[in-house]
Image (spheres, grey):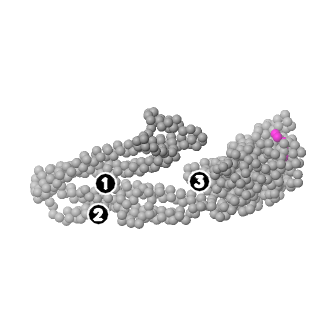
Amino acid sequence: MLKIRAIKIEVNTTDGLFGAEFNFSDGLNIIRGNNTSGKSSLFQSIIYGLGFEELLGGKNEKTMQSVLKDQVEFPRGTKHNINQSFIFLEIENKEIITIKRSVTSGSRKAQLVDVYFGGLLTGESQTIESRQMYVHDAGSASDELYGFHLYLTEFLEINLPEVVTAKGDLHKLYLQQLAPAFIIEQKTGWSDFFATMPYFGMRNTEQRVVEFLLNLDVFENEKRKQQLNSVKQNINNRWQNLFSKFQHLAERSGGKIIGIDNNPLILNNYDGIYISLIKDEKSITLAKLNEIQKNELSILENGQTVTVGSNVSKNETELNKLNDKLNQVSLNFELLSPELNFDREKLNQYEKQIIAVQDDLRKNKGALKVNKLGGDLPTEIAKNICPTCAHELKDSLLPSDIQQTPMRIEDNISYLDSQERMIRVYIDGQKNTIYEKESKLKDYQNLIIEIRQQIRDLKKELIQDERLPSVIEIEKRIDLKRRVEFFNKILENFNPLIEDLKNLSSEYENLLNKEKDLPKDFFSDLDRQKLATLKNNFINLLRLFKYQSKPFEAIRISTDTYLPLAQKTDAEQFYNIKFDSSASDFIRCIWAYTTALLQTSIQYNTNHPKLIILDEPKQQDMSKESFRSLLVELSKFKEQQVLVFASFENSDASFDEATKGLTFKYNKIEQLMISPIV
């Protein structure tokens, strides 16, 4: 619980000390003051003391009114320049602390906060220790020693939940993001639900706040889902990184990886994952080819030295084979090159087609939207005229004498959607085909270079002295040894990657199992009870406050945003209740929703701080009867705390009429709040 016990404002001016001091109690507190008396300054001072001034539209002293930072006017017409000003705020949650912040001071900045461990204002603590902290600076919500909002969170025993940021990261809610659910300021706060919510780059903040305040299980389920999504993203990134390493090894060895792709899979057969190479126009695994090369090397190393003369016949035969092979590979290269160019052109055509389909889809969706809003279809479409070339459009290829019904625009959109998906499949397939053919073309190029070099070496050896050792055999042995060593290193790097892949595949399988364990409906039975209670409390309060814009049976609480919705007349569609409520009725909605949140939290003992602070809730010429009904309901919170700042139309009669028979703590601002302190 957050209880405001007392506040003291000290303002040192060139003409002496000015200020104000107020005490508050449990239950309903009414702070009354005429317009321009400084009532809103008192409200803002409480917000400022808590470090919640983002609700006022900014940070630090710039959010405060001039009476606390520039000039004090007292009596009216007489102004006193301010030298320094401080706010002292005493709060309670089992224990008592007093918060001190400067609004203006020559010796300290507004971010500096003094926390006194006791009741500095009420005088109930004899010994007051203090500690300095900071607010509205990096670390104020996370610094364990000096972060004021982290300290305040711990003092209030609030375990702030983690939510998804706009960047997709997880970050704890900020304490001041809870405040718009129970603190409503006058200028902006009555314009919408959670109107003063500071976002801090977080998604769906209002929903997360309601889930936290009502301690909905869906919050934990959503958090589990977010955590699993984070784990999935991590696995995807690691898998892609691992796949890149496999690809790199395969490319270094002149082959390609078989058995896995760029997306995570549950793998059962790891023998099916290997590097595939081409030898003699046939596929072979790198491991098997390496074994063949090892055997060949062993034979060469254990055999006798071969001379040029003893190898003449063999070299002539090999030369003929290489010439034939060169002709065949060159032919393959020449046949594949135009195929590749054709495939590239086909890909270009597909990409043009998908751009055209996307453009048609965009136009049709726009036309449908206009049509649903009550507009007419674009003239060129309605008249079957092409908007580009102005030629007549035919609905089909059937003869004109055969009657048939053209597709509706919705059918067009559905057809174009399917066309777009189909073309995307073609594009992906074409890209894969091009990649494979480019790889094969590169292999042919490398093979042609290799064969030509072998032919040159053979021709050179055929004209050498027959008594000399065969250079080709020597180079073959050296090259074979180099290849074996190179492939050994590739395999040495490949096998650990397989182990990493096994572990990652196992992690992925566990992730899928956990995702299956997530409930399809994230709401627990208790969640549904709480939301039903919130709805009933909200509607009951609307009745008491004399809401009239919509029938009560047409009102519900959204299971997505947890905000009130109203049903459109003669339709199943629900929309924000704000859009079909009168200005005064929407104020009633904010009263009811703010109060219903506290009522529901009390019924289920959830995370609401058990505090409501309202600045001038009587907006939009609200009826006196409705305003009294609000005060009656707020006065029922005996063990919680409600602070209502109101002018009561600057009328004693209005005040007496609204508060008659109610129990409340009364603070009245006489003339001006900031006055001389004697």
Residues packed near mark 2 inside 10 Å, few (<14), some (14 to 19) or many (20 plus)? few
Q: Residue at x 50, y 63 (%)?
A: 512
Alpha-carbon distance for marks 2 and 1? 15 Å
- Is 463 rendered above or below residue 292? above
The residues colored magenta run 32-36
Q: Residue furthest front?
A: 401
Type of amino acid at the residue the image marks with label 2: Lys
Provide the secondary structure element on which disc 2 rests.
Answer: helix
In the picture, which quadrant includes the N terminus?
bottom right
Circle 2 is placed at which residue position? Answer: 288
Q: Residue at x 25, y 46 (%)?
A: 334
Circle 1 is placed at which residue position? Answer: 254
Mark earlier in primary sequence (3, 1): 3
Alpha-carbon distance for marks 2 and 3? 50 Å
Residues packed near mark 1 inside 10 Å, few (<14), some (14 to 19) or many (20 plus)? some
- Is 605 rendered above or below residue 675? below
In the picture, which quadrant includes the C terminus?
top right
Nearer the observer, disc 2 or disc 3?
A: 3
329 falls in the magenta region: no
Q: Residue at x 79, y 55 (%)?
A: 641
Circle 3 is placed at which residue position? Answer: 164
Residues packed near mark 3 inside 10 Å, few (<14), some (14 to 19) or many (20 plus)? many
> Would residue 267 appear left or right of 535 to someone viewing this image?
left
Residue 356 image point, x, y percent: 44, 41
Q: Are marks 3 and 1 in contact (CB under 8 Å)?
A: no
Residue 394 image point, x, y percent: 44, 39
The secondary structure that dominates the magenta segment is: loop
Mark earlier in primary sequence (2, 3): 3
